[in-house]
Image (cartoon, rainbow, N blue to C red):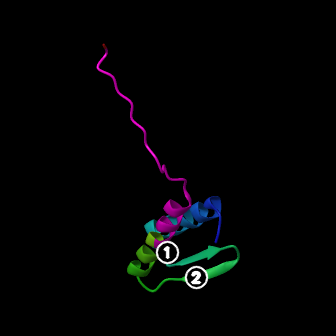
Amino acid sequence: MADLTQLTAWRDALMAARYQGIRTVEYDGKRVTYATDAEMAAALGDLNRQITSTTARIAVVRIQSSKGL
């Protein structure tokens, strides 16, 4: 699996190509051509899921309160 910086770079390149209407994107010397915008959206969704899964999650939240007495 790729690291966070590489996933973010891939996502940014794919988003830029999508917004420009370009269907062919190059990653690390590899060329990918998407047939439809739906395929690009699916690829972006997958990249976003991978990015969120690599970020650290808070496992425990402890709340302490007082009545001020």
In-front residue for pair 47/53: 53
Dominant secondary-structure state across the stretch colored magenta: loop
Check disc 2 and report the residue beneath it.
32
- Indicate the quadrant containing the N terminus: top left, top right, bottom left or bottom right: bottom right
Farthest residue in the bottom direction?
35
In-front residue for pair 69/26: 69
- Which residue is found at the position 58% from the left and 82% from the top? 32
User: Looking at the picture, how far across and down is residue 54, in whole percent?
Assistant: 56, 61
State the image quarter where residue 38 is shown: bottom left
Q: Is residue 27 above or below residue 60?
A: below
Q: Is residue 21 above or below residue 59?
A: below
| Left/right of residue 67 with respect to residue 56 in the rendered view | left
Please name the amino acid that badge 1 sits on: Ile
Which stretch is magenta?
A: 46-68
Check disc 1 and report the residue beneath it.
22
- Which residue is found at the position 58% from the left and 67% from the top? 10
Q: Which labelled disc corresponds to residue 6?
A: none
Please name the amino acid that badge 2 sits on: Val
Say which label, 2 or 1, has the lower sequence index: 1
User: Looking at the picture, how far across and down is residue 8, in whole percent?
Assistant: 57, 61
Tag 2 secondary structure: strand
- Which residue is found at the position 54% from the left and 53% from the top? 56
Q: Is residue 32 above or below residue 48?
A: below
User: Looking at the picture, how far across and down is residue 4, in whole percent?
Assistant: 61, 60
| Left/right of residue 16 with respect to residue 37 in the rendered view | right
